[in-house]
Amino acid sequence: EVQLVESGGGLVQPGGSLRLSCAASGFTFSNYWMHWVRQAPGKGLFWVSRISGDGGTTLYADSVKGRFTISRDNAKNTLYLQMNSLRAEDTALYYCARRSDSGGYFDNWGQGTLVTVSS
Amino acid sequence: EIVLTQSPGTLSLSPGERATLSCRASQSVSGRYLAWYQQKPGQAPRLLIYDASSRATGIPDRFSGSGSGTDFTLTISRLEPEDFAVYYCQHYTNTPWTFGQGTKVEIK
């Protein structure tokens, strides 16, 4: 069974940093491209970032480019999101999601970790 | 960037009724690269439909997707109590991937 478990969320002041993790199990992690998608409280879904299976290719939404860094450790089956220079508008539930091996849609999602940026 | 607009914002229906949800794209979604997700309160999104009309593993056949180009539809043939939720469309024809704002299907 595919499992994605996020952690690392919490309360952080504006301008601060946080590192999210997503522990994967139940599949060959290195074979899959992975994404981060966030959802602000009471709002819709917003794609944040993507990384290739070998970690060599990354992509970011314009609103987080230069502030967030996606990475992965395939030996540990773990996906990361380093978030720097956090803003109030980054407050959201952050999901990791697995890209299907047959298309660009997300076939498995974690339960999310909440990031709150507030003074 | 492709903007996806879902309508209606809220759909009030009774169990057993048919639900028709719309997703309109600001430009053509090539390859019919459109997915639908269901999200219940406090839960992560769940993939329902991919490639506009293919059901994901384990999804009941009362859920169906159709459409191409800029107009896509998710149909729930007969609503079950567990189908009352928020539904999102998402394209993956190019980057950035974007989602519609969601349609809430509520019990009338």
Image: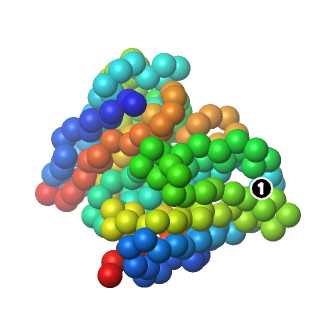
Image quadrant for the C terminus of chain A?
Answer: bottom left
Image quadrant for the N terminus of chain A?
Answer: bottom right
Residue identifier under label 1: A29
Which of the chains bears the disc numbered 1? A
Quarter location, residue A101: top right
Q: Residue at x 43, y 79 (%)?
A: A12
Above or below, B86 relative to A12 = above
Q: Position of residue B29 (x, y in %)?
A: 43, 23
Quarter location, residue B72: top left
Q: Residues within 10 Å of mark 1 (few under 14, many from 20)?
A: many
Q: Nearer the viewer, residue A112 or B103?
A: A112
Element carrying mark 1? helix
Residue B80 seen by the camera: no
Q: Nearer the viewer, residue A14 or B19?
A: A14
Q: Residue at x 18, y 49 (%)?
A: B10
Q: Residue at x 51, y 27 (%)?
A: B93
Question: Residue furthest toward the right?
Answer: A75
Tell me which colouring the rendered structure shows.
rainbow
Above or below, B55 relative to A53 = above
Q: Residue at x 33, y 68 (%)?
A: A88
Disc 1 marks which amino acid? Answer: Phe
Above or below, B79 relative to B4 = below
Residue A56 as seen in the image, left or right of residue B6: right
Above or below, A119 relative to A96 = below
Q: Nearer the viewer, residue A5 or A12?
A: A12
Residue B27 as seen in the image, left or right of residue A33: left
Q: Position of residue A91 (x, y in %)?
A: 37, 68
